[in-house]
Image (cartoon, helix red, strand yellow):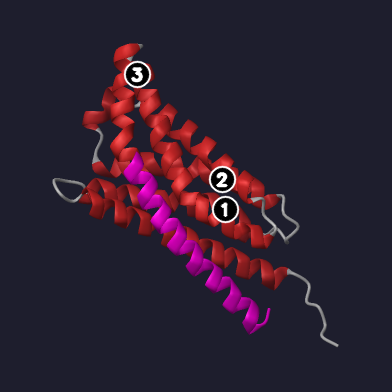
Amino acid sequence: MNSKQTQIDWTFGLQWLLLCAIGTAAGAGAAYVTMWTVGEAVGEAINPTLGLLTAGILFGALIALGANLGPGWLLRSRSVNGLRWILISVVAGALGTGLTFTILSSSFDSISGLASSLAIGLALGLPVGIGQWLILRRQSLPAGASVNAWPLISMAAYICAGLAVVNLSGEGREWLALGIMGLSVGIITGLGMAWIMRRQASLAPSIPVS
């Protein structure tokens, strides 16, 4: 791998970081504004369980959409289907958080901050990471341990994001929490993807220059 390849990978990582951070914060903000309003309306009109499921689906879908719009667009330059990346992320996020909200509905008030952060990481980061990993595995790039680490990278990003939300949320601090959440996801997944791309470049066969 030459220095130009390394520079391209880290430039790619920085672009990913910025787009993902802004998108995650925007998606989380949209979820914060809408999820409980819509969920409560559905709960009152139909039943409370369906209302919780709806709130959870909105939470995961909007955050996953915001976090992956920019990265999905960037991945087109690496022969990855960006639209598929976005769609599978949204579906996986919506299903993961929708089911988690419904299952944990009876114990919301008793869950500690750390447990809530871990739940967000497992419910959002893990299913999204697995869906994205399946896409990465289909690419023609050499598949090594770096690609296989992607679900763990994704889960770690959302656990840190959950910690930001749990510890910083409060009167007047919601938008600060959303900003830190976006930066957490952007930094961890951006650096993680840059590392994967760098590892893939080092595994690819070198082409002699005539």
Q: Position of residue 106 (x, y in %)?
A: 28, 22
Name the secondary structure under disc 3: helix
How far, Cα to Cα, is label 3 from label 1? 31 Å
What segment is highlighted magenta in the picture?
1-30
Query: Does the magenta portion include 3?
Result: yes
Name the secondary structure under disc 2: helix
- Left or right, residue 39 beside residue 7: left
How far, Cα to Cα, is label 3 from label 2? 26 Å
Residue type at mark 2: give it.
Ile
Q: In the displayed structure, would residue 79 be above or below residue 2? A: above
Residue type at mark 3: give it.
Val
Q: Position of residue 86 (x, y in %)?
A: 56, 45
- Left or right, residue 119 beside residue 170: right
Query: Does the magenta portion include 39?
Result: no
Q: Position of residue 55 (x, y in %)?
A: 36, 29
- Residue drawn at (62%, 46%) of the image: 83
Name the disc covering residue 86, or none: 2
Q: Does the CB distance between marks 3 and 2 fall below 8 Å? A: no
Name the disc covering residue 42, or none: 3
Task: Tell me the crowding category of disc 1: few under 14, some 14 to 19, or many 20 or more residues within 10 angstroms, Cα based.
Answer: many
Q: Identify the image quadrant of the N terminus.
A: bottom right
- Residue drawn at (35%, 45%) of the image: 28
- Looking at marks 3 and 2 on the same chain, the residue that comes earlier in the sequence is marked by 3
In this view of the protein, can residue 14 be seen by the observer? yes
- Residue drawn at (73%, 61%) of the image: 142
* Residue underneath mark 1: 72
Q: Does the CB distance between marks 2 and 1 fall below 8 Å? A: yes
Task: Tell me the crowding category of disc 3: few under 14, some 14 to 19, or many 20 or more residues within 10 angstroms, Cα based.
Answer: some
Task: Tell me the crowding category of disc 2: few under 14, some 14 to 19, or many 20 or more residues within 10 angstroms, Cα based.
Answer: many
Residue type at mark 1: give it.
Gly
